[in-house]
Structure formats: C-alpha cells, structure tokens
Image (spheres, helix red, strand yellow):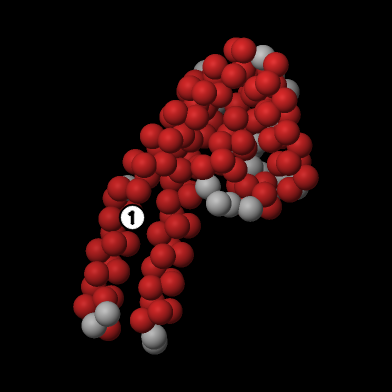
Amino acid sequence: MSTYLVNTFINYAKMKTSYKFFFKDLAQSIADFYGVDVDLVTNKIKTRKMEVVRGRQMLTTLLKQHTDLSLKKIGRMLNNQDHSTVINTIKKCNDYYDVDIDYRNDYNKLNEVAKELKTTTLIHPVKLHFMYDSMNIQETFRI
C-alpha cells in the first residue's frame, strides 16, 4: 500500500468524522438557542413552527458556510432533502437576513457559535484517535 493512499484515507476519515461532530454539535446548539428538540431542527420530525423553521434555515446556511460539503450532502444530512431545497433554504435565510433585524442578530450569534464549534471539533477525542493511528501508520510505513 502506498503512503499516498494511506495518507489520503486518514485525511478522508478525519474530515468525515469532524463533519459529523460539527453537524451534531451545531444542530444541538441551534436547538438549544431556539428552545426546541434537536430532531425538529434536523428535519427528523416535520413541523412548520417559526422557531423550528428558523433553526433549520440557520443550520443549513451555516453548514454551507463553514464546511465544503456539497448541497447534496447537506441535504442528505437533513433527512434526505433535495439539493434544490437546500438552495432555496439558503436563499430564504439570506433574504431574511437582509430585512429582519432579529433574524440577523440570531444569525450572527449562531455564526459565532459555529466558528467556535468548528475550532473545537478539531480536537475531538475521536480525531485525536485518528491522529494517533496516523502516527502509527506513518511509523509502520516509514513516511
């Protein structure tokens, strides 16, 4: 096995794991912010309550802003939404941001939370485990 393939696999595993933790932590933070259940925000339970819809819009937009996930992958994370639904949600979020001061304030607060979560997910215990494994693999293959 080439060292390139090993490094590529390790980097992919780290990235995939960090996105899952970032998604879960961000969804939980948004649910707490709006005082709703995390399953409502992640679209596992359908409802049209304003605070839930806002939470979903924030989650979708912040995922797109803070990750390099495709629209299709973001849709999958949000209970198999279509990519066009994700586009529409981001557009609505941007439109509300321009006209609603309360919405803008909520978005700015949650954006700061997302920035903080993005840095803290880099040192998650599972990621440290991957880093440790990568050191062992590097020693084994003398990279």
Q: Quadrant of residue 112?
A: top left
Left or right, 17 with reference to 126:
right
Q: Is residue 23 above or below residue 135?
A: above
**Taking the image as drawn, is residue 16 in sight?**
yes
User: Residue at the location (48% across, 57% down)?
Assistant: 16
Quadrant where the N terminus lies? bottom left
Relative to the observer, which residue lies in front, 99 or 5?
Answer: 99
- Residue position marked by numbered label 1 in the rendering: 127
Left or right, 114 with reference to 48:
left
Q: Is residue 70 above or below residue 78?
A: below
Label 1, residues with CA under 10 Å away: few <14, some 14-19, many ≥20: some
Q: Position of residue 54 (x, y in %)?
A: 64, 24
Q: Quadrant of residue 87?
A: top right
Q: Position of residue 67 (x, y in %)?
A: 53, 47
Quadrant where the C terminus lies? bottom left
**Outermost residue toward the bottom in this view:** 1
Q: Is residue 54 above or below residue 102?
A: below
Q: Is residue 132 above or below residue 96?
A: below
**Outermost residue toward the front in this view:** 98
Q: Position of residue 68 (x, y in %)?
A: 55, 51
User: Residue at the location (24% across, 83% down)?
Assistant: 142
User: Residue at the location (38% across, 34% down)?
Assistant: 116
Left or right, 128 with reference to 117:
left
**Taking the image as drawn, is residue 76 in sight?**
no
Kind of residue indicated by mark 1:
Lys
User: Residue at the location (43% across, 79% down)?
Assistant: 5
User: Circle 1 sits in a helix, a strand or a loop, which is it?
Assistant: helix
Q: Position of residue 139 (x, y in %)?
A: 21, 78
Left or right, 135 with reference to 121:
left
Q: Quadrant of residue 126?
A: bottom left
